[in-house]
């Protein structure tokens, strides 16, 4: 087998059908309408129903569990296309992080029941980890009291991705001895209170409080720490892919603009200062695309390399996507900074995604540690 | 087991048996093997490695067998590259003949030219240099003035070339000359081969770089005579050949630093871990550049995969040339910083890094400057208008 960063025909089909679906959804229009109405769930639910038609909730689950049995090389394509079209929906939280967590948690009884519903698109899962403003999976204080093979959780989680529409929450908490565990909680339980405000990107910003909430135990101790790292890494990889899509779209629109906007009697794309900036943005995107592809490939083919490459991919895209979208705004001039014009929506999503699950500095620190620096 | 797997096993076994231990491991500037009539091998292993690879045609893996090449498909060549990388095998031959002239001859050369010139290139027997630039024709190459007049059966060349890499150490030169002075710019340029650098009237004298290396030279032509069969392609249409060849040059330069040592590896070797941790800013710079270099390596890998799948790289080779040289400068700067003051002692044990840094600066200029590469990306890849 030739080590290849190219995608197979199967994966290309997923990419194309997801791309077509998202284009048809006109997600940006929906996003604007939801923002005006301060409705932070309708867009995500609508898109999720359509994505379920394509079988995307179970993309990473084995066929025996009602899934498509595909790998990360396939699932990152979906996120890239979501980024291109600014489509929302619980793909990252449910199909990627949730599916991985449940499949690998080792608690087959609870997991299988939830997984079947997850694959069918009838149940959404979110991961509740952060308690601090900056992402820090080590700063977990949520308490888990264990008794009779179950747990009772109390604590407060911030920035829970898709926490506003989740049916189940996978919660990181510590037992009285300080050992980490992952727990499964019914999000509709009366002891679970979600507070949703609007994020910079018009997507929800969710804080969840647990007050003696009853939970199933998924895994504990070293297993929980390892699994949590894996889930977060999977999330980082897919956020990188989403940022790639958003940055690429903002860039493509910008190149079109450089070819049509006329000043000083010629199209502004003739000015060398702008040509060089465009060339550098293009180069940065080509490089970014390659490290995302390589990291995804490693998850499927060379898992030992995946953590390091994932840290790199998220660090790289968190920088590139913010830079490319900010340049896109600048190269559009005045219209670029108007709310009515869409390029700013890409800037805001890039900024938000860059900060989720660890920004550039966090991921570089993670790389440095993994590298033994 | 599929065919490509069988081929991989065969390549692996052959490399294991034939690549001398001294020819494995990272390659610095001093370890390149340029070949040619005047080449003095650094050691027996270097001679052996070239001879063995040339025998298989693997110094030019994808050239047809009839011209001495390896006759491999793009996929097979990719396997060979990967297997060489796996054991850190050095490139057996650094050759402008392999990188540039060969591909140009395969496309534009006559059958007789291919038979005459290609096999010695594969065997590393003739060292070629590139005579393009002139004192007044650098980035603006098409303004070149060295002229060649066709007088009966010979071209007679007069003029001057400059920045000719290793011109004074080479056996032969491919060059661009003006054959029709009445035509402007691209028209009226021809692509000529000079088989012998000791032809009467031809004189190459070395120029010293800021690194101290005698890398390039000035070449003077005073009624230098070349048979008319040495014209490649059509008379006055040499720019087509030159342009085609430049793509290969950029691609080749773009790949030069593939899998170069990352700053983290260098730092962990040169500093103790505690000292490094006490300098978080430096540690951060190292991690940042590791990332940029690794991401660029992934790009090289992706483009190689695309090439193996039959996708032409085209003008995107400028992207490789740009980042390869720009990132190498950053890498050398950082390594010099890591060494601290010991890196500034030109006669000390760490002098190499400063020299490599100075050499890296030249790679942003040779083969078309970084600014020119950005122009090409903007115009040829992004199709932005103008000039
Ligand atoms: C190490 C090395 C090896 C070389 N080997 C060879 C060789 O083997 N054979 C050979 O023929 N040549 C060789 N060259 C020459 C090389 O190709 C030229 O030096 C190069 O093309 C630049 O030309 P120049 O030196 O005349 O600089 P100039 O063209 O005068 O450039 C001066 C500055 O102006 C900038 N500039 C010029 N035009 C533009 C533009 N349109 N837009 C924006 N900026 C611009 C350049 O980027 C540069 O920064 C080599 C050079 C080096 C450094």
Image (cartoon, coloured by chain):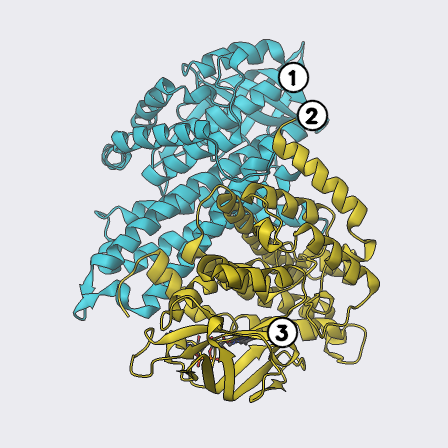
Say which of B168 and A36 sits in front.
Answer: B168
Q: Secondary structure at mark 1?
A: loop
- Report the disc number at residue B359: 3
Left or right: where B367 falls relative to A262:
right
Residue A70 at x, y = what percent?
51, 24
Q: Is residue A317 visible to the viewer in this orientation of the structure?
A: no
Residue B213 at x, y = what percent?
67, 79
Q: Colour of chain B?
A: yellow
Q: Secondary structure at mark 2?
A: helix
Inter-mark Cα distance, 2 to 1: 9 Å
Q: Quadrant of the N terminus of chain A?
A: top right
Inter-mark Cα distance, 1 to 3: 56 Å
Q: Is mark 2 within 8 Å of ligand 1?
A: no
Crowding at dot 1, Cα within 10 Å, few <14 / some 14-19 / many 20+, comes out as some
Crowding at dot 2, Cα within 10 Å, few <14 / some 14-19 / many 20+, comes out as some
Left or right: where B326 falls relative to B25:
left
Q: Is mark 3 within 8 Å of ligand 1?
A: yes
- Report the disc number at residue A106: 1
Q: Is residue A142 above or below residue B53?
A: above
Q: Nearer the viewer, mark 1 or mark 3?
A: 3
Q: Nearer the viewer, mark 3 or mark 2?
A: 3
Most extreme residue toward the left is A265
| Labels 3 & 2 near each other (Cβ < 8 A) | no
Does mark 2 fall on the same chain as mark 3?
no
* Colour cyan belongs to chain: A
Chain assignment, label 3:
B
Inter-mark Cα distance, 3 to 2: 50 Å
| Labels 2 & 1 near each other (Cβ < 8 A) | yes
Chain assignment, label 2:
A
Q: Is residue B386 above or below residue A316?
A: below
Left or right: where B112 falls relative to A279:
right
């Amino acid at each position: 087998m030739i080590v290849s960063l190219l995608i197979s025909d199967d994966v290309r089909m997923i990419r194309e059908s997801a791309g077509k679906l998202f284009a048809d959804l006109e997600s940006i229009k929906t996003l604007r309408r939801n923002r005006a109405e301060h409705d932070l769930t309708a867009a995500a639910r609508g898109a999720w129903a359509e994505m379920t038609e394509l079988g995307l909730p179970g993309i990473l689950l084995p066929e025996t569990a009602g899934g498509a049995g595909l790998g990360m090389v396939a699932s990152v394509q979906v996120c890239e296309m979501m980024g291109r079209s600014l489509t929302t929906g619980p793909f990252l939280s449910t199909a990627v992080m949730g599916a991985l967590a449940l499949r690998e948690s080792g608690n087959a009884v609870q997991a299988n029941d939830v997984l079947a519903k997850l694959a069918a698109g009838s149940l959404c899962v979110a991961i509740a980890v952060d308690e601090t403003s900056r992402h820090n999976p080590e700063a977990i204080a949520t308490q888990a009291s264990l008794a009779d093979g179950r747990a009772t959780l109390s604590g407060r989680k911030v920035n829970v991705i898709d926490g506003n529409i989740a049916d189940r929450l996978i919660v990181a908490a510590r037992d009285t001895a300080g050992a980490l565990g992952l727990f499964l909680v019914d999000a509709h339980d009366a002891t679970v209170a979600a507070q949703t405000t609007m994020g910079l990107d018009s997507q929800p910003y969710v804080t969840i409080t647990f007050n003696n909430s009853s939970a199933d135990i998924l895994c504990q101790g070293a297993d929980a720490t390892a699994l949590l790292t894996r889930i977060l890494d999977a999330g980082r990889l897919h956020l990188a892919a989403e940022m790639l899509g958003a940055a690429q779209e903002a860039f493509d629109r910008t190149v079109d603009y450089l070819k049509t906007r006329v000043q000083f009697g010629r199209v502004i794309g003739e000015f060398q200062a702008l040509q060089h900036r465009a060339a550098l943005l293009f180069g940065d995107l080509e490089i970014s695309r390659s490290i995302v592809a390589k990291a995804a490939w490693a998850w499927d083919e060379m898992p030992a390399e995946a953590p390091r490459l994932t840290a790199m991919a998220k660090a790289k895209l968190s920088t590139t996507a913010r830079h490319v979208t900010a340049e896109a705004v600048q190269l559009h001039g005045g219209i670029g900074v108007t709310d009515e014009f869409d390029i700013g929506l890409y800037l805001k999503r890039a900024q938000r995604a860059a900060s989720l699950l660890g920004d550039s500095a966090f991921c570089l620190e993670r790389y440095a540690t993994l590298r033994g620096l | 087991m599929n065919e490509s797997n069988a081929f991989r096993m065969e390549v692996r076994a052959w490399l294991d048996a034939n690549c001398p231990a001294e020819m494995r491991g990272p390659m610095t500037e001093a370890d390149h093997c340029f070949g040619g009539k005047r080449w003095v091998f650094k050691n027996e292993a270097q001679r052996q490695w070239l001879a063995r690879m040339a025998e298989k045609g693997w110094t030019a893996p994808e050239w047809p067998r009839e011209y001495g090449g390896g006759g491999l498909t793009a996929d097979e060549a990719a396997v060979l590259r990967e297997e060489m990388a796996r054991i850190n095998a050095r490139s057996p031959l650094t050759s402008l003949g392999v990188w540039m002239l060969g591909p140009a001859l395969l496309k534009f050369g006559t059958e007789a030219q291919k038979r005459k010139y290609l096999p010695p290139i594969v065997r590393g027997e003739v060292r070629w240099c590139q005579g393009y630039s002139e004192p007044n024709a650098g980035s603006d190459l098409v303004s070149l003035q060295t002229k060649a007049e066709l007088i009966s059966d010979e071209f007679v060349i007069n003029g001057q070339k400059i920045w000719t890499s290793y011109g004074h150490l080479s056996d032969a030169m491919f060059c661009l000359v003006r054959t029709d002075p009445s035509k402007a710019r691209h028209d009226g340029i021809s692509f000529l081969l000079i088989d012998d650098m000791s032809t009467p009237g031809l004189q190459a004298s070395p120029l010293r770089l800021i690194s101290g290396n005698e890398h390039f030279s000035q070449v003077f032509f005073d009624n230098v005579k070349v048979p008319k069969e040495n014209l490649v392609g059509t008379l006055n249409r040499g720019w087509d050949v030159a342009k085609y060849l430049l793509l290969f040059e950029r691609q080749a330069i773009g790949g030069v630093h593939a899998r170069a040592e990352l700053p983290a590896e260098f730092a962990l070797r040169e500093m103790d871990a505690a000292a490094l941790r006490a300098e978080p800013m430096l540690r951060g710079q190292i991690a940042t550049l590791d990332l940029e270099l690794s991401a660029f390596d992934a790009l090289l890998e992706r483009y190689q995969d695309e090439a193996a799948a039959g996708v032409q790289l085209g003008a995107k080779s400028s992207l490789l040339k740009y980042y390869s040289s720009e990132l190498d400068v950053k890498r050398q700067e950082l390594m010099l910083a890591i060494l601290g003051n010991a890196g500034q002692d030109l006669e000390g044990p760490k002098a190499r890094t400063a020299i490599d840094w100075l050499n890296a600066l030249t790679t942003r200029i040779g083969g078309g400057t970084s600014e020119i590469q950005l122009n090409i990306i903007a115009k040829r890849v992004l199709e932005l208008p103008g000039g």
